[in-house]
Structures are given as structure tokens and as C-alpha cells.
Image: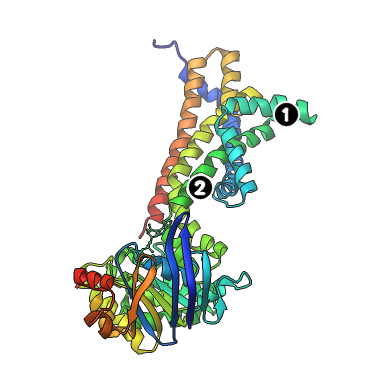
Amino acid sequence: MITVNDLNKQFGDNEVLKGINCEIKPSEVVCVIGPSGSGKSTFLRCLNMLETITRGEVIVDGFNLNDSKTDINMVRTEVGMVFQQFNLFPHKRVIENIMLAPEKVRKISRSDARERAIKLLEKVGLAEKENQYPSQLSGGQQQRVAIARALAMEPKLMLFDEPTSALDPELVGEVLEVMKQLALEGMTMVVVTHEMGFAREVADRVLFMDEGIIMEEGDPEQIFSNPKSERTKEFLNKVL
Amino acid sequence: MEGKFNWASIIDFLPELGTGLYYTLLISIVGLLIGFVLGAIFGLGRISRNKLFFGISSIYIEVIRGTPVLVQAIWIFFALPLITGYNMESITAGIVVIAINSGAYIAEVVRGSVQSIDKGQVEAGRSLGLTHNQTMRYIIWPQAFKRMIPPLGNQFIISIKDTSLLSVILVPELMFQGRLIASNYFNAVEIYTAVAVFYLAITLTLSFVLRYIERRLDVQ
Ligand SMILES: Nc1ncnc2c1ncn2[C@@H]1O[C@H](COP(=O)(O)OP(=O)(O)OP(=O)(O)O)[C@@H](O)[C@H]1O
Ligand SMILES: [Mg+2]
């Protein structure tokens, strides 16, 4: 589903990603952990070209992202993204947030888009909120709407950038629950997270990033109970 | 003071003042409509990555903001015809002045409002596969437009008052009519007071309408 070869990203002189290699298979759930500033968000954002790639190769669903012939909007329709700050459209009602892209990008009819949106709202447990504005919802509810909005494009792959970091602790669970459900349904997911419990329980594989490289990767059991790298040990000691 | 001023005489001049009011409104409305279009275009120019578009927009805005409206009016009406050999009617010239002048300020309002929208909104739109233009149209513009209303209203009021300067290029607007009457009938106090009240009536009405629109748009 995703192949990353020697991905390098610089902001000016600041080399943020220093040669990332990885391979993510369909239906795999990969959690990315690591200290602040290690490049986790940048890595994720390179996967749907929210950041340009300085060097290396990123292939998503068969599309080579550095190929200038690749229609990036086309790739993005297959890659859903969920942000730390939700980024719902505040001027649109919940249902309109979800309907917008299917209507304008997938060009499906308004009634089909509405039907799809209502199904997704039911799925994330917010059926009764369709006519609210985002500002009328709690953070956890907003993030679930954001997930529904991304799912409405029927993506093959979902990227999550610390989806629960902006939430009050008591609201984290409801969002993780939706993500867990999604994982069970076989969605391919890349999740940057500080929720080690979630990573341990749901991830098929954990990547530990540090200073712009993938320092260590493995199945969650191995990473959490028996980390090989000193840096991973240090990091886990701090966060667990 | 009693009897010195003949306030009732204002009524005799209402037809002339009415004509003035008509031209003031005409020039304000048409000028500001064109100004809004110019503002939208050059405001987008200021956030464009196209260097030429950005450059032209910047020059336009700086030149207009850096020179007085009175100079712009006189230059367009008296100097420009000497260059182009083409005489403009004063009313047309008045509309052009208001349009060009307000356009530069509105451009800055547009730029500021668009830039004030959180970057995450663009990213959310683009990550859903919307094109740049679709993102602007469905996500950024509607939010930016709401934020534009207060500063836009401010600019409308300034431009309406600026139309009074067009009397020097012989536009038959309110101030022009007032000066004409006052110099013929020596009733400066009454007439200029009436003129001031007319301007106040226009600007207060506009303020009221704008506040209403703001409240309506703020439903959520
Ligand atoms: N747009 C940008 N321009 C310049 N530098 C940037 C930009 N975005 C990120 N950086 C830098 O890249 C480095 C990695 O940032 P990134 O956001 O990827 O880290 P992260 O691992 O996601 O951290 P966190 O856990 O705090 O979210 C940081 O040093 C940051 O300052
Ligand atoms: Mg981050």
C-alpha cells in the first residue's frame, strides 16, 4: 500500500527526515511513536504530499508521489487524514462537513452524499448531531466527525496525526474506540500517537522515530517489552 | 441668535440637495462595487505565488495608499486627459476615483481576512482531495468573507465620506451642491449643517445594516 525509499525532507537547512525506509501492507495498522520534534508529523504529511519531498521515493497505492505526472488530488482521495486539531469546517454543519468532498470531488449526488454521511455519523455514534455546527460539539465529538469526514471519501488508507492529543483525558477513549473499530474492519492505518496502550493493543507494527530516522521497528510486544535500541528504552521509560 | 439663521429655508433647497444625495449614492455604490471586485482581485494577488501578479498588486496598493484621494481625483480628472487626450466626464471620473481608491484598501482587507484563516483549514480541504480552487471557494472564502465584513464596512464609510472631495472635480454630489447653494445664498451655516446631516444619515444607515448582517451571519 505504501512504499517509502530513503525519504528525505529538509526545511531550509534543517534536515528533518534523514532517510526513511518502510513498507506498509494493506490492512496493516502501524503506530508511529517517538519524541517531540523527531519528524513524526512531517513523515505522515509526506505520505499525502502536504509536505513536498526533498529526496527519495514515496509510493502510495501505486502512485509515485514525486512523479510530476501523478495527480496529487487523485492520490489524496484515497488517503484520509485526521489532524490533531480536528480542522473541521466551522462554517458548515456536521453533515455538510462530511458531504462536501464526496459531492465536489467524487461527484456523487447530494442525496447519496447525505445518505453516506448519515451512515458514517451512526458509525461514529453521532447520528443526532448532523445539524449542529462543530463549535457546538465536544473535542471528542469533533474528532469523530473528522474521522467520518475522511471516511466519506472511502479511502484505502487513513493517516492519523496525534488524533487524541488535543482532547481532555476523559474524551480520548471515545475516539480510540472508533479507531479500533476501523482497524478491526481492515482499514490500513498509520497512526502517530502518544497513546501507548492503543499502540500496544491495536498496532500490527510499531515504528519508533528519533531524529529523523526510524530507529527501531517491530511488533508492539517486542518494542514495548524488549526494545533493542537504547533510545527506544529511554523514550519508553519516560512515557510509560 | 434667534432669527439670525433661517433653518426653514433648507426646505427650499431640498431638490438641489436631493440631486446631490443621488450622485453621492450613485458614485458610492457603483464605485464601491467596482472597488470590491478590484479588492478581491488584487487582494488575491497579494497572496499569490505568481510573482508578476503579486508585484502588480503590491504596486497598485502602495501607490494608492501612499497618495491622498484628493490628489488622485485631481490627477485623474485634470492630468490624465492631458496624457491620454481623452476627456472623462466628471461623474465617470468620480466613480473611477472611488473604485480605484477603495479597491486598494479592500485588497488589504481581503488579504488580511484570507490569511487569518487557520492553515489547517486548507490542509483539511486539500487532504480530502479538493483542488486549490475548490478549497478556496468552499472553505476559505466563506470564512474569510465573514471576517471581512467589519473592516469592509469601515472602508465603505470612509469611501462615502471621500466622495465629498469629488466636488473639486465638479461632480454634482452633496458637497458640491452645498457649496453652490451657500455661495449664492450666503446661508453657509444652514446648508453645510444640512449637508453634514445627510452624510450622517447615509453612514448611520450603513452602520446599522452592517451590524444587522454581522449578527445574522454569526448564528453559529
Ligand atoms: N513547516 C515547517 N517549517 C520549518 N520547520 C518545520 C516545519 N514543520 C516542522 N518543522 C520542524 O521539523 C522538525 C520535526 O517536526 P515534526 O512536527 O515532524 O515533529 P513531531 O515528531 O511530529 O513532533 P511532535 O511530537 O511535537 O508533534 C521540528 O524541528 C520542526 O521544528
Ligand atoms: Mg507532530
* Residue A142 left/right relative to B175: left
Q: Residue at x 25, y 85 (%)?
A: A221
Question: Which residue has dot 2 on it?
Answer: B111
What's under tag 1, amino acid-wise?
Leu
The numbered disc on residue A173 is none
Give the chain of mark 2: B
Question: Which residue has dot 1 on it?
Answer: B80
- Quadrant containing the C terminus of chain B is bottom left
Q: Residues within 10 Å of mark 1 (few under 14, many from 20)?
A: some
> Residue B91 location, x and y as percent?
67, 33
> Residue A42 location, x and y as percent?
42, 65
Question: Visible in this render: residue A235?
Answer: yes
- Quarter of the picture for ligand 1? bottom left
* Helix, strand or loop status at disc 2: helix
Q: Nearer the viewer, residue B65 or A220?
A: A220
* Helix, strand or loop status at disc 1: helix
Give the chain of mark 1: B
Question: Visible in this render: residue A107?
Answer: no
